[in-house]
Amino acid sequence: MLHYKGLVVLVTGASSGLGEAFAEQFAERGCTLILVARSEEKLQMLALRLQSKYGIDTVVLAADLAQPMEVNRLVSEIKGRGIRVDLLVNNAGAGIFERFLDAPLEEQQKEIALNVSSLVALSYAFLPDMVARRKGGVINLSSSAAFQPLPGANIYAATKSFVLLFSEALSQELDGTGVQVLAVCPGPVATAFFADKRPSIAQSKMDDPKQIVRESLRAFDLGKRVVIPGKWMVRMTAFGVRFLPRTMVARVAEKTAYQLNQR
């Protein structure tokens, strides 16, 4: 278990939702924060609030991580300042909830770049120093969608499946180095991510981001490799689909998505 006070934590997608909740709970633990998202204005507001409330140091770096050049610029900026990253929270992500042929290819490629490529690049950039210090960790935001095909959002589910499998394999590769890797696989969370999505999801069926982060950090402290935080039904579904024929799982998922979309 890490002692958090004084650690430097890089949180992507920090301006709202789960990213903001991660930033808040790390600030409460006395960490220095590197806050990354597209909106510098939102990040500055968050940084001022956390500095005032917890007396911590923050660094604000605006970047669009769906753009490879922006990812490279971010890494260069952090390393150029001589900042040591102790914990990396790959939270930034996007989801297109449309059928594959109905969504613009360019937007789906950006989704892959953000959900997968930027996560891999940032991990590759900061993990070597953690391993050299024999201390640190990476928390990757996957999704309960990672456990099944999801017609109507298939690129999203596929990218989150990548994040899950990448994280599990990376955790094994780093076993014994002192560096932890955790994949977080929540179901729907009450954030702006789902505010304008179709199919719509009732608020009562979504989890609170603060609770998701609390459960995730508890799992990280325990050295777990995967956690499915939130409602028990999300965990039951993720577990249950392993025992059903894959064709059946895809059909049920498609039917459920269609029914929700008619509401």
Image (cartoon, grey):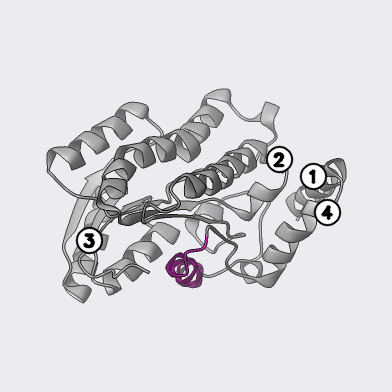
Please report the bounds of the magenta region as a residue range: 211-224
Q: Which residue is mark 2?
A: 152
Q: CA distance from mark 4 to mark 2?
A: 22 Å
Instruction: Find numbered disc 3 in the image and state the secondary structure of the residue it sits on.
Output: helix
Can the viewer see residue 38? no
Q: Which residue is mark 4?
A: 243
Q: Which residue is mark 3?
A: 47
The 10 Å Cα crowd at callout 4, few under 14, some 14 to 19, many 20 or more, is few
- Magenta span: chief secondary structure: helix
Q: Nearer the viewer, mark 4 or mark 2?
A: 4
- Give left or right: position of 135 versus 161: left
Can the viewer see residue 1? yes
Amino acid, disc 3: Ala
Callouts 2 and 1 close, C-beta under 8 Å: yes
Dot 1 or dot 3, earlier in sequence = 3
Dot 2 or dot 3, earlier in sequence = 3
Q: Which residue is mark 1?
A: 254
Q: How many marks?
A: 4
Q: CA distance from mark 2 to mark 1?
A: 7 Å
- Give left or right: position of 28 versus 188: left
Q: The C terminus is located in which quarter? A: bottom right
Residue 204 lies in quadrant: bottom right
Instruction: Find numbered disc 1 in the image and state the secondary structure of the residue it sits on.
Output: helix
Amino acid, disc 1: Glu
